[in-house]
Amino acid sequence: MIDVDSDDELYNEIRDVVVDRAPAPRVWPEVPTERAQRYRREVEDIRDQYEDEVDPYDTTMVSEYAEDIFDYMADLEDDVMPDPEYISTQIEIDWNMRQTLVDWLLQVHLRYHMLPETLWIAVNIVDRFLSKRTVSLQKLQLVGVTAMFIAAKYEEILAPSVDEFVYMTERGYTREEILKGERIVLQALEFKISHYCSPYSWMRKISKADDYDIQTRTLSKFLTEVTLLDHRFLRVKPSLVAAIGMYTSRRMLGGDWSDAFVFHSGFTEEYLLPGHQLLVEKLADKNFPTLAVCQKYAHKKFLKASLYAIEWSRMHINDLAAEQMSLED
């Protein structure tokens, strides 16, 4: 359990979690070897045949270095993946409590107009820390606010001060507790914060396939943020989360998953269907509209993306069973 009366007590009471169980699979979705090889061949065939028009004047994608950059990002993904089953090592916390915490972080993030990557880094810090340490329910919000504090210092130009983070918790924690928590979290994660690359980085690459269509990207941003609230996506790499978000967005807007999308994402439509189904299930949940991410994207600034996505999901939720059966065949 976490108690921050002193550094010594804190270090003594935060222990490494050792659980006698088989390691969770890193590759998701789990598919037979033969099918995985077929997916790989399909992607390689498209990459061999597709001609990508490189714009040397597109400074946002730095075409000269883009391929090396994304290869490096792909290599880093495994290092910053949390344990997707870490809740089994927690005594007082369950997945619903995690969702409540992430929903609160979304509200804080929106209230202080922080950058998108700050939110993603903060949630990744929370999940990785909870994968390594057992935390009491009383201190769960402290882990969340500490994670946001660290992420903001790394990502923001003008990060909120520690006193502002105290205010965010309605003075539920002191500045000393947050500063001590920062030391504990950074040490537990071995200071690996910058290694994490959010799905937004991959989404920018995939968006080239439709010339950065604003409706597709806005809806996709909403859909990827939804995955933050769903613990089933903890085993999904950021690059795949981005592809699932873009694919679902295309489906909702009546588009297809063309060779251009396969080329830029590295995933075929069939490979993305399991993630698409999880996302639609989450959106169709009767309690989903009460969450902060839904209210955020219901604003006209975001083209009322959440309202459209929820309506579409409820209309098509019954089609998922048929898609699942065809996928298994």
Image: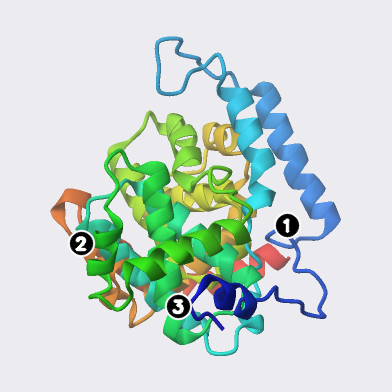
Give coordinates of residue 301: x percent, y percent.
16, 49
Residue visible at 27% across and 52% down in the picture: 160
Observer-nearest of 191 and 258: 191
Q: What kind of element bears circle 3?
A: helix
- Classify mark 3: residues with Cα within 10 Å, few (<14), some (14-19) or many (20+): many
Element at label 2 = loop
Neighbour tally class for label 2: few under 14, some 14-19, many 20 plus, Cα within 10 Å: some
Say which quadrant the C terminus sits in: bottom right
Indicate the secondary structure of the residue bearing disc 1: loop
Left or right relative to 109: residue 73:
right
Label drawn at residue 140:
3
Q: Earlier in the sequence, mark 3 or mark 1?
A: 1
Between the residue at mark 3 and the residue at mark 2, the CA separation in whole angstroms equals 28 Å
Query: Percent x, y for residue 13?
Result: 61, 80
Mark identifier at residue 27: 1
In the picture, which quadrant includes the N terminus? bottom right
Marks 3/1: CA–CA distance: 29 Å
Amino acid type of the residue tagged 3 in the rendering:
Leu
Residue found at x 68% / y 50%: 79
Front residue of this view, candidates 219 and 129: 129
Of residues 48 and 117, the one drawn nearer to the viewer in this rendering: 117
- The amino acid pointed to by label 2 is Ala
Q: Which residue is mark 2?
A: 298
Upstream in sequence: badge 1 or badge 2:
1
Q: Residue furthest bottom?
A: 92
Task: Please tell me how crowded label 1 is: few (under 14), some (14-19), or many (20+) other residues with Cα within 10 Å.
Answer: few
Q: Which residue appears at 67% of the width and 22% of the height? A: 49
Measuring from the top left, give residue 217's x and y in whole percent. 35, 43
